[in-house]
Amino acid sequence: MVKLYHVHLSDDERTRLEQVISRGKTTARVITRARILLKAAEGWHDQEIVDAVGSSVPTVARVRHHFVEGGVDAVLKDKPQPGRPRALSSKQAAHLIAIACSPAPDGHDHWPLRLLGQKAVELGYVESISPETVRQALKKIS
């Protein structure tokens, strides 16, 4: 298999990677990437690296690629992950809590989650909300 991305490390880069590994003050994922780069720079084949660090061939190829394209920082620093947006803003959660603190509806001794959600929609605080989202919001304050 022909390698598209060859790893050549400067002395400073090699020292930095060795420090990342020896300090152990970062995630295992980052330490593994540092080990992959050091072994790739020593001329190890991808499968040998996989066997040595307990990774996979696609991971080794991806680390090589990120290094060639962006240097050591591109390999050692994870890009921020977008994640899922919050279901409720702080203001919406405050409104929901205010409803929960108000007197319970007729026939109830407390606000059921489903009725809390319906009231928040009725008052225009949210477009829609699930009982689970209501539960999680209330759990945060208890």
Image (tube, rainbow, N blue to C red):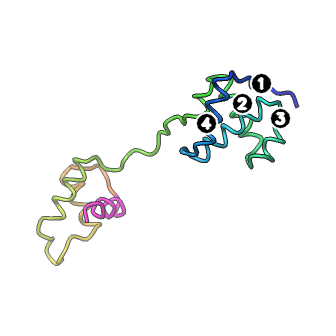
In primary-sequence order, the first of circles 1 and 3 is 1
Q: Are marks 2 and 1 in contact (CB under 8 Å)?
A: yes
Towards the viewer: 119 or 14: 14
20 left or right, relative to 108:
right
Residue type at the position of mark 3? Trp
| Foreground disc of the pair 4, 1 | 4
| Foreground disc of the pair 4, 3 | 4
Residue type at the position of mark 1? His
Q: Are marks 3 and 2 in contact (CB under 8 Å)?
A: no
121 left or right, relative to 14:
left
Measuring from the top left, give residue 30's x and y in whole percent: 60, 41
Towards the viewer: 14 or 100: 14
Marking on residue 19:
4
As measured in the structure, the alpha-carbon distance from the residue carrying label 2 to the one carrying label 1 is: 7 Å
As measured in the structure, the alpha-carbon distance from the residue carrying label 4 to the one carrying label 3 is: 20 Å
Instruction: Give the residue at x 74% y 25%.
Output: 7
Residue type at the position of mark 4? Gln
Tell me the element at label 2: helix
As measured in the structure, the alpha-carbon distance from the residue carrying label 3 to the one carrying label 2 is: 12 Å
Count every numbered label the image shows and give the total: 4
Tell me the element at label 3: loop
In primary-sequence order, the first of circles 2 and 1 is 1
Measuring from the top left, give residue 96's x and y in whole percent: 22, 57
Residue type at the position of mark 2? Arg
- Does the segment drawn in magenta span residue 60? no
Tell me the element at label 4: helix
**Relative to 99, residue 52 above or below:** above
